[in-house]
Image: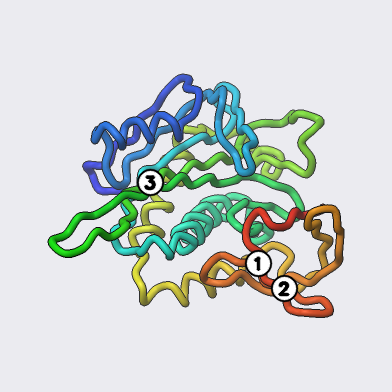
């Protein structure tokens, strides 16, 4: 859990919580575990260059600064998996067992998207006497989760909010603090010996695991069966052959 010294900054409005958190970390005004929450986000970042907007008090828009000192730069997906599990811990506590993780780190309820994660990493050089190693300075974990929103843009397909699932209205800032705690608990547990257990948990919750799905690679659509995600973040599927896809290499057709 966050320590008593962790900051939880609440903003009425911001263009992007990730931008704000990045600026705070760069200026040494934020440290490991600090969080930025905004009631309104006008230019939030999503995967593949998409935006994530949220109105007043409707959804969670939060960014958390993490210093992954226990991880190597090559182990970035372990952080991503830990964050996805923290989001699942949070959302499933309200929405129940039909909550899943869609590769790489979206949160789904049944077949509908409830939230997503964007991680921005800052990599630097760590100078030593006879070495100049690349080090992972910090990561900005941006999370958007639909909470109270009931009407969505018609262009958004297969989306859902916690209110739509439960029929209840929630105090978004209180839920954001709960999510913050669960993310810190998961990321603080990261160490080399925990990776196998982490991926076992992640894959047990994998969206469409052992199910046939349709994917697109370039201009080609094909059917394949989702099997698992590897420790380096590749999606493993099986059809006529075994396939291993990097993030961004294929697109889901749902």
Disc 1 vs disc 3: which is toward the camera? 3
Number of callouts: 3
- Say which element carries label 3: strand
The answer to whether the residues at label 1 and label 3 have Cβ atoms under 8 Å apart is no
Marks 3 and 2, how far apart at CA? 30 Å
Q: N-terminal of the two: label 1 or label 2?
A: 1
Q: Give the camera-side residue of 211 and 5.
A: 211
Residue extending farthest to the front is 130
Q: Is residue 130 above or below residue 54?
A: below
Q: Is residue 192 above or below residue 1?
A: below
Residue for point 31% across, 37% down? 25
Residue extending farthest to the left is 129
Say whether residue 55 is left or right of residue 19.
right
Based on the displayed image, in which of its 4 quarters is residue 221 positioned? bottom right
Residue 111 x, y percent position in the rendering: 76, 53
Residue for point 32% across, 57% down? 134
Marks 1 and 2, how far apart at CA? 8 Å
Which residue position is annotated with label 3?
122
- Say which element carries label 2: strand
The answer to whether the residues at label 1 and label 2 have Cβ atoms under 8 Å apart is yes
Residue for point 46% across, 46% down? 179
- Say which element carries label 1: strand
Q: N-terminal of the two: label 1 or label 3?
A: 3
Q: N-terminal of the two: label 3 or label 2?
A: 3
Residue 181 x, y percent position in the rendering: 38, 49
Which residue position is annotated with label 1?
235
Residue 61 x, y percent position in the rendering: 51, 34
Which residue position is annotated with label 2?
243
User: Is residue 1 at least partly visible in the picture?
Assistant: no
């Amino acid at each position: 859990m966050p320590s008593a010294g962790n900051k939880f900054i609440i903003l009425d409005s911001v263009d992007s919580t990730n931008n704000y958190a990045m600026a705070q970390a760069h200026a040494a005004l934020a440290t490991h575990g600090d969080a930025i929450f905004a009631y309104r986000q006008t230019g939030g970042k999503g995967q593949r260059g998409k935006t994530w907007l949220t109105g007043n008090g409707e959804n969670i828009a939060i960014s958390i600064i993490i210093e992954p000192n226990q991880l190597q730069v090559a182990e970035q997906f372990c952080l991503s998996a830990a964050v996805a599990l923290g989001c699942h811990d949070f959302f499933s506590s309200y929405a129940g067992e039909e909550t899943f993780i869609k590769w790489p780190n979206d949160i789904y309820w049944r077949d509908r998207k409830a939230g997503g994660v964007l991680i921005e990493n800052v990599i630097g050089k760590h100078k030593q006497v006879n070495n100049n190693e690349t080090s992972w300075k910090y990561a900005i974990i941006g999370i958007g989760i639909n909470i109270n929103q009931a009407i969505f843009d018609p262009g958004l397909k297969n989306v859902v909010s916690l209110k739509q699932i439960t029929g209840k209205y929630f105090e978004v800032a209180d839920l954001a603090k709960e999510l913050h705690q669960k993310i810190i608990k998961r990321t603080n547990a990261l160490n080399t010996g925990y990776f196998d257990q982490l991926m076992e948990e992640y894959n047990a919750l994998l969206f469409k695991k052992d199910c046939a799905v349709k994917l697109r690679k370039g201009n080609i659509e094909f059917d394949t069966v989702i099997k698992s995600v590897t420790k380096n973040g590749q999606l493993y599927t099986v059809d006529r052959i075994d396939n291993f896809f990097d993030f961004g290499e294929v697109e889901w057709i749902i």
